[in-house]
Image (tube, rainbow, N blue to C red):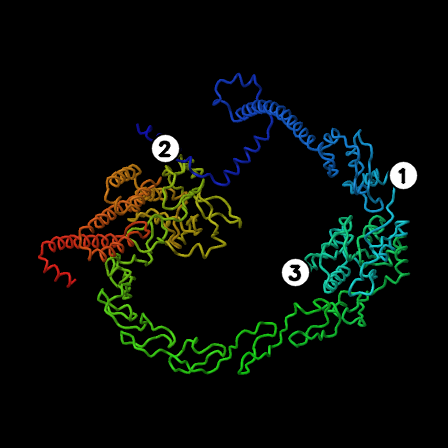
Amino acid sequence: MKLQDQEEGTAHLQEKAVQWEVTAAQRKKMKQRMKVELRKLNAMTESEAEAIQDVWQLDLSSRWRLYRLWLQTYQGFIRQRILQHERQYQAAAGRLMELKQQEDLCILKEAEVVGMTTTGAAKYRQILQKLEPRIIIVEEAAEVLEAHTITTLSKACQHLILIGDHQQLRPSANVFDLAKNFNLEVSLFERLVKVNVPFVRLKYQHRMRPEIAQLLSPHIYQHLENHPSVLKYENIKGVLSNLFFVEHDFPEQEIQEGRSHQNTHEAQFVVELCKYFLYQDYLPSQITILTTYTGQLFCLRKLMPAKTFAGVKVHVVDKYQGEENDIILLSLVRSNKEERAGFLQIPNRICVALSRAKKGLYCIGNMRMLGNVPLWSKIIHTLRENGHIGRSLMLCCQNHPDTKTLVSTAADFSKVPEGGCSRPCEFRLSCSHVCTRVCHPYDPEHKEYQCLKPCQKVLCADGHCCKRSCYEPCGPCMVLVEKTISKCGHLQMVPCSTPEREFLCQEPCQKMLSCGHTCDSFCGQECTKKCPKLVTATLKCGHNQQVKCWLTEETCEEPVECDTKCSATLECGHICSGSCSTCFQGGFHKPCSSPCKRFLVCSHKCRQPCTAECPPCQMACQNHCIHSRCKKKCGEPCFPCAEPCEWRCQHYQCTNLCSEPCNRPRCNVPCTKLLGCGHPCVGLCGEPCPNKCLVCDHEELTQIFFGFEEDPGARFVQLEDCGHVFESQGLDHYMDEDDDVIKLKLCPTCQTPIRKNLRYGTIVKRWLDEIEKVKRKIQGPAQEIMSTASRLKATLAMNVVLEKNLPHKYHMLQQKLQAPSLSTKSIGLIENQLNFYKRMADLTQSMSKIDVNEKKWVRKRLAEVQQWLDQPRISFMGQELSDLQAELQRLTYLMNLLVRCRIGTAMLPPALKAVLASVR
């Protein structure tokens, strides 16, 4: 029978251990083992599986092989279903696509012109074949891949019109080898032109002014004429030339591991030139900065803060084909000793870069190096013939045309800080002052300029001048002058523009209030209605206190809070820290806020304020063994470990579970192992070797503590929780001592609780078991808690008075009783609240029986009691219970007295009733 009970207990422990958390090392080991098995492919054959009689008799390897067979069978079944659903989906998707194409085709047939990109033409090729357009126009055909153009053609095509310029950028291919070795970057447009298929070249250009067009014709375009509209362009403001190339020899820098280039000198110069053109009153949208490399693009953007350059476009040349702007600033970037021109030697890119400007083109680059490229050599020759190239750009002030400034670096633009010249502006403003800026071409009429000089306008007949800045509105005269106030006769300093009848006299009022104090308001204001002077008054509680005078008036209904210290001695022995008002004149004392300083059963110090009983510990549980660690809160019961005990040596072995008391004695045979220093271990057989050596740490180990440390055969034990080392005989005696208090044994040196130690495991487990009993008692038996909750629910349901008079509290108690987890403490709090709210509801209902004159202050007192009762708390302290019971009993007696008084008054003659009413 005992064996059966033991087996049932073991099974119970194992069942609880399901919720015990596995250690990280064990979890990692299991995960690795699972991964190894899941990666294996060997599976059991179907014949082997059919021969199995009982799967529980299979070894672990066979079970895995059987699992893989089941997995393969299930996967095959799923694959068949996936293939079946895929066929159904493809068929449905095909039908849907046909319907959509038919719908699109019906719409397109009604249109006279259909427009789409070449990508869209490839996507909707089937619709185009059915639509059968007779005329196809391809715009920018020289920049479209040949395959994309052919996609748009159908057998019904009668006329193909290709519009483009094969001397500008070619189509871009993603694979460089295909582009170069197999001519993938050659468009159908270019291919047809080169095989002499008849074509028409447009004769007139409508974009560039003639000076810019000279760079392209005849070097790139043989016959190109200017349309009359480009001859009417105005000159670019602030410079002498509408076209100029700035030469330099500053070297470039490689970035992005040699994949791109930047030239800081060019970037800084172009940014300053752009700012200069903005000063010339050009809109940001009229200026575009172009460069030939992405690295230079990023460098330019870093130098251009959005506040100054918002709206200015910055692009690489390849992304700007088909675009144009009034002013183009071009940075060519390349400048190196090897004289590698890179992209700049490709005629197509040169053509695009030089043909984007309408009115002004300004370029900066190493022209000496670019002169080695044949096409650039011709362009540079044309520039030199016309004087459009040099090492410095000539700036011209719009306001002073005779003043000219040469700029070759970004620093040179400091000579024209405001876009004009270094002369002062000297423009006479409408206020008769002179503009203080240097010469600036923007805002020539100075409509946006704000004059910061002091305003000298005369504001009034007395000759007072305005004190504001010139650009600000003057406003009325605010100079203080002495005036006599007609209402009171006082002399006051009044703003000049303010009539004395509208000014409030600032002299102190000398009128006497009804209380005898002088008015605190100003003479021009209404007299004070609430006297703020402090007077000594006797409050209703009997204490004398300094209060504001108006609070002592008979008509004042605002309560005065007494600040006198309560100083009563509470049940816990501490002095009450509340005041007369916060303690409701001694009726409800303020909860004690002194620190508890008591140790809980788990050895942690209570962190709550001083209370009659400490709440369960909310810290993380520190109980652990060699197998795992508890993850609950310290105040919650722990699950026992169901793993086998690890306390074993070559002489003894424990056969119980880890959470059960050990069934083997302590082994006192000296340990035979060697420490890391090479000296013999000072520990005992089967125990963890101490990290102290009798040779290396002789003074520390032989320091007298228990008295046996210097014995020749002394052996030592190290506590795992704190690491301190003690002599084994003395520590055995210390651990075997019985304590009257339920708590863990502590380290004799540092007072750390001893939770994990195999040698003293039986003692530790015994105290842990006692602590668990205390935790379960605090938590309360579940059956008893459920029974109490059911009883309270029934009591609450039958209390009609509480539901009628305090409905909010009634529903609050209902919700608390429906909580999924209740403890002994929480159920006790609910029961006390229910009893107190019942008595409050009875008192509230009894108010209908008392005199009307008494209801007001009784209702106020009940509200104060309910406010105190509603405060959040874990439980009622002893002091709180006694205070509340005494106050409710007093109110009950008072209510009974008031009811009897009303009944007695009703029986009095009318004359006596009148006398009694006058006394009240």
**What residue is shown with label 2?**
12
Q: Quadrant of the N terminus?
A: top left
Q: Quadrant of residue 868?
A: bottom left
Real-space Cα separation, disc 2 to disc 1, in angstroms: 99 Å
Residue 784: x, y in percent?
Answer: 28, 38
Res 307 label = 3
**Does 271 sit left or right of 532 as displayed?**
right
- Callout 2 touching callout 3 (CB < 8 Å): no
| Vertical relation: 254 (above or below) 10 | below
Residue 273: x, y in percent?
Answer: 76, 62
Nearer the camera: disc 2 or disc 3: 3
Nearer the camera: disc 2 or disc 1: 1
**Does 73 sit left or right of 774 as displayed?**
right
In terms of sequence position, does the residue under pointer 2 or pointer 3 come before the other? 2
**What residue is shown with label 1?**
198
In this view of the protein, which residue sits in the foreground, 505 or 721?
505
Residue 427: x, y in percent?
Answer: 70, 74
In terms of sequence position, does the residue under pointer 2 or pointer 1 come before the other? 2
**Does 563 sit left or right of 237 as displayed?**
left
Identity, as a three-letter code, of the amino acid under mark 3: Lys
Real-space Cα separation, disc 3 to disc 1, in angstroms: 53 Å
Label 3, secondary structure: give it. helix
In the image, what residue occupies the spot 60% across and 27% down?
Answer: 41
